[in-house]
Image (cartoon, grey):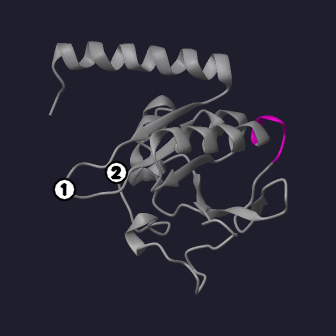
Amino acid sequence: MTPDAQTIAWLDQEDAHLAQLIRRHGWAVQYVAADEDEGTSFAYTVGLFGLGHPELAVVGVGYATACGLLNRVGDLVLDGRDLVAGEVIRDDDGVPVLTVEELPNPGEVLFSANRFYQRPDEFSVPAYQLTWALPGGVFPWDHAWSCEPDCQPRPGEWRA
């Protein structure tokens, strides 16, 4: 299905705005709110791939938290840190707050990033999911995890 002229014009404006944000800040954050009936909210970066790093995604948090988290970790990448799958990111007190995990299905999630880099979904830009911990450093795989499983789906278990 070919988009109509109005949709093409809107996409062109969105592409230009995204390019401006990436030029100004190094990356942008794309937030996708859950719909009323199903799904989980998530956000991801667009632009880190252009810096030679996988994009970053976080799932199950609100807009402000997602933007703050992705921008803080994006700053680490901009400062030269190469995150790797399995790495644990700690707060200033040494408490684990994030684990970096490979996102196995980025083509089903990173639509704006793939559009920006002109990559088809089957050759998607790579991404890491930043898995967040509950206070005290409790992750979804820990016995003390008290959140429902769908509050933070595991990598590959969710889609846009």
Q: Which mark is residue 160?
A: 2
Q: Earlier in the sequence, mark 1 or mark 2?
A: 1
Task: Tell me where the magenta segment starts and ends, as one range.
Answer: 77-81
The mark lying in front, picked from 1 and 2, is 1
**Label 2 CA crowd tier, 10 Å (few <14, some 14–19, many 20+):** some
Q: Main secondary structure of the magenta part?
A: loop
Q: Residue at x 38, y 42 (%)?
A: 32
Residue 160 location in percent, x, y? 34, 51
Q: Foreground: 41 or 100?
A: 41
Q: What residue type is disc 2 on?
A: Ala
Q: Which mark is residue 37?
A: 1
Task: Tell me, yes or no, whether the highlighted magenta stretch contains residue 80.
Answer: yes
**Residue 65 in the image, given as x and y percentages of width and height:** 55, 44
- Assign a secondary structure to mark 1: loop
Q: With 113 as the anchor, is 133 left or right in this view?
A: right
Q: Residue at x 46, y 32 (%)?
A: 118
Q: Position of residue 91 (x, y in %)?
A: 78, 55
Identify the mark at residue 22; answer none if there is no mark.
none
Q: Secondary structure at mark 2?
A: loop
Amino acid type of the residue tagged 1 in the rendering:
Asp
The total of numbered circles placed on residues is 2
Q: Residues within 10 Å of mark 1 (few under 14, many from 20)?
A: few
Q: Is residue 141 above or below residue 126?
A: below
